[in-house]
Image (spheres, rainbow, N blue to C red):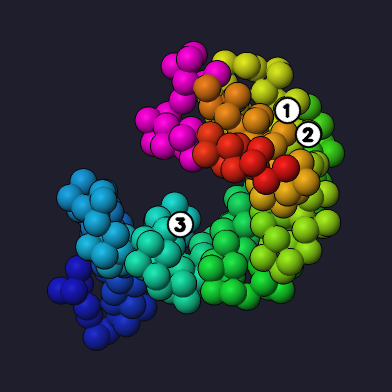
């Protein structure tokens, strides 16, 4: 193609060089994508439980792929695990550049940013982000008020809002948010008792309420223990969650003793 240059026909030469540049750019993009996939595979296959080793590979993959939101999220998770919360925020900000504003993914990313802010003790920004995410999820729910995924999104967001209120020492507002979240979780669990995820959500909601509502701690811890025992009996309690049952029993005993 370069040999096609002819000083007597510069327009033809320019077209030839433009085609060559396009091919080089396409190949460069392919190589970046291949390198990103390679680094991501190395991190997930070789270092699934070693955040300090996985983080540089996952974040390099995200920088190479740029528009792959999942890569940025995984980069954020590993940075959080190694205590680099500023880096975690930067990864999420990069992810949001490639997410449709107002979408479910956008709201979920706002919740993750709120988690990062809470971890740094930035409670006011965390509250703003959690409230913004909640508003987006509630707006989505208006379009499909019985959709289970949209209902759960609102419930999870309410718990996040409650978490910030707890951190701020406002247990009244925390209790209100947690109770709204619990109501939704109960609705979902009643619709599908065999859904392990929705049963677990009930455990989480009651656990949070037990901490925010000490006057009714016995009732809430009782619900936690009952739900965990029921899940265990039905074989839907995750192995990673089995450790919470003895903790909940101890907390229930302590709450009864404090009455």
Q: In this view, does 208 lie to the left or right of 67?
A: right
Are the two marked residues, 1 and 3, in contact with CB atoms closer than 8 angstroms? no
Question: Which region is colored magenta?
Answer: 230-247
142 is within the stretch colored magenta: no
Q: Identify the mark at residue 73; answer none if there is no mark.
A: 3
Quarter of the image with the N terminus is: bottom left
Disc nearest the viewer among 1 and 3: 1
Please provide percent x and percent y for residue 253: 58, 37
Disc nearest the viewer among 3 and 2: 2
Are the two marked residues, 3 and 2, in contact with CB atoms closer than 8 angstroms? no
> Looking at the image, which residue is at 24% across and 56% down?
50
Q: In this view, does 74 lie to the left or right of 133?
A: left
Q: Mark 1 points at which residue?
A: 186
> Looking at the image, which residue is at 30% across and 71% down?
21
Please provide percent x and percent y for residue 177: 78, 49
Residue at mark 2 to residue at mark 1: CA–CA distance: 5 Å
- Badge 1, how many Cα within 10 Å: few under 14, some, many 20+? some
Of residues 13 and 126, the one drawn nearer to the viewer in this rendering: 126
- Quick one: SS at disc 2? helix
First in residue order: circle 1 vs circle 3: 3
Q: Is residue 125 left or right of residue 239?
A: right
Q: Name the residue under label 2.
A: 183
Farthest-out residue, left? 3
Are the two marked residues, 2 and 1, in contact with CB atoms closer than 8 angstroms? yes
> Looking at the image, which residue is at 34% across and 72% down?
18
């Amino acid at each position: 193609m370069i040999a096609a240059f002819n000083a007597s026909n510069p327009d033809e030469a320019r077209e030839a060089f433009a085609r060559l540049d396009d091919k080089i750019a396409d190949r460069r993009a392919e190589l970046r994508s291949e390198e990103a996939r390679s680094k991501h595979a190395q991190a997930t296959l070789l270092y699934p439980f070693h955040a300090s080793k996985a983080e540089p590979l996952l974040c390099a993959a995200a920088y190479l792929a740029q528009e792959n939101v999942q890569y940025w999220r995984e980069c954020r998770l590993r940075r959080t695990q190694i205590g680099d919360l500023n880096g975690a925020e930067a990864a999420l900000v990069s992810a949001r550049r490639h997410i449709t504003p107002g979408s479910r993914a956008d709201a979920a990313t706002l919740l993750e940013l709120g988690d990062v802010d809470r971890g740094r003790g930035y409670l006011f920004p965390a509250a703003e982000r959690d409230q913004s995410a909640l508003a987006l999820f509630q707006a989505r729910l208006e379009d499909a008020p019985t959709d289970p995924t949209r209902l759960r999104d609102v419930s999870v967001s309410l718990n996040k809002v409650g978490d910030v209120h707890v951190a701020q020492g406002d247990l009244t507002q925390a209790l209100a948010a947690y109770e709204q979240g619990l109501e939704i979780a109960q609705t979902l669990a009643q619709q599908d008792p065999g859904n392990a995820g929705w049963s677990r959500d009930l455990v989480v909601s009651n656990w949070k309420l037990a901490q925010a509502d000490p006057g009714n701690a016995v009732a809430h811890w009782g619900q936690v223990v009952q739900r965990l025992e029921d899940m265990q009996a039905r074989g839907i309690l995750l192995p990673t969650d089995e450790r919470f049952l003895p903790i909940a029993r101890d907390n229930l005993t302590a709450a009864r003793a404090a009455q």
